[in-house]
Image: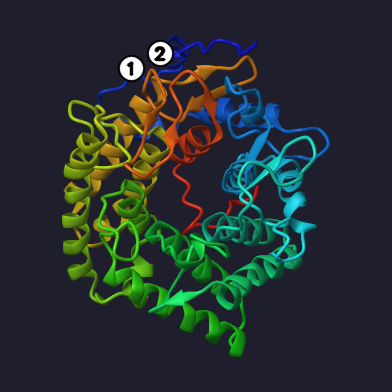
Amino acid sequence: MVKPARPLVAFFFASGLLACRSTAFAQTLFGTPATARGLAAFLAAMQHPTTGLLGSFPRSRDAAFQRVAFTYDMAVSALVLAHHGDVQASSRVLDAYRQMSLPGADLLTFNTAYDINTARPAWEYHVHAGPLCWVAIALIRSGELTDQPEDIEKGAQLLEWVRGHLNHFKGGVVMGLEDPWAYTMSVENNWVYYAALRVAMSRLQEGPRREAFAEEARGVRAWLERNIRNRGEGDAVKALDVYTHALLVGPEAHLDNGPIHDPERLAGWARDWIRELDELFQVPGTARYDYTDAHEARLIGRERAGWLEGTEQVAVAYLTWAPFFEAQGDTQFAQHLREQAARAHEEVLLFAIDDGHGVALPNTDAPQPFQTFMDGWMAQSKNEPALNGTNWAYLAAVGYNPLTMKLPKSDD
């Protein structure tokens, strides 16, 4: 039987999270250790004692879904646990992927999802570029933290596999090996791939291998520029993650390979991009953000709804760019970004769930599951804890962006 969710409003009031409206608003929210501790405690409690994997939706009303560990969620969970200082738990998550050979035709390794009890492929029998790139990032960040060059090497090998085995089109990469993914392209996935290449290059010595990564990154960035507002090649549907990931890669990623090499001009682009993001995706009357814009929601026939994982990605993205605007002398816009991130994070925390083990966040703020896009999946309701919401709530709470930042060492 599924344990009913208990909102943690009282918890956050007691922690001081919802009591702050001063000029220190953002700093108070993002500097609260209790939030991060509670979120990390939930992850640690959900870890399977044998496989080390975590159920992505551990209290789902669908019993089979409770046992599914999505590879993307595992990568981000490993980053969260390592950031919180539980390096052993983080390493146990990654152990399942360290031991895998590179993807093959049998689709047994680096699958989209695994059964937490058996560590065998489950749910979706596909190899997708996005989750694989997140594993590469998690391995490289873990290797940096623990001084394990074999983790860095495995992450680099995964990216080399993407470069050598997935179809390319005008510089960008497709989503996977099998139809329809072998000819479907995702802007979000290509942003993650671009970020992963940059993370790997930061660890590679000068030479042919690093130059091959750099050439690949330039090609991916050029494809992204041609599709910068699209969901994919020729797919003009508006998607929040397209806008957030263009920011999550950080300012330097734009200055290095994008069409704008002047920081002042880039600041102008980013202001316009952020305003467009807010106009398209922010749910009216809230600080939360929908998967898509009002037009797509009307086509589906649904009300606007808050995607909590996506909302926290907005928060992390805005925190990533605030120092850049400060460096450009625009302290007012930097403060606006921090305060907007804080408001978004605060509203997400209103949907926190007392799981009995720690603090968890659901997938969305909706009372019932709903369709994300006309051709999209069903998002889960506010009544069920989800790793995706929980992980990104942690990252927003501590202000950590794994696409641009190393994991902190204990002496940092």
Q: What residue is rendered at 50% in x and 36% in y?
A: 394
Do the residues bearing badges 2 and 1 touch, measured as CB atoms within 8 Å? Answer: yes
Residue in front for this viewpoint, 308 or 302? 302
The part of the image, by quadrant, that contains residue 285 is top left
Can residue 207 be seen by looking at this rendering? Answer: no
Q: Secondary structure at mark 1?
A: loop
Residue 230, x across and y down, in percent: 28, 59
Which amino acid type is shown beneath numbered disc 2?
Phe
Residue 94, x across and y down, in percent: 71, 50
Q: Which residue is mark 1?
A: 19
Q: Which mark is residue 13?
A: 2
* Mark with earlier residue (2, 1): 2
Which amino acid type is shown beneath numbered disc 1?
Ala
The correct choice, above or below, for 13 with respect to 182 in the image is: above
The correct choice, above or below, for 44 with respect to 324 in the image is: above
Which quadrant is the N terminus positioned in?
top right
Residue in front for this viewpoint, 71 or 249? 71
The correct choice, above or below, for 45 with respect to 114 in the image is: above
Instruction: Give the Cα distance between marks 2 and 1.
Output: 6 Å
Q: Residue furthest right?
A: 50
The correct choice, above or below, for 43 with respect to 147 in the image is: above
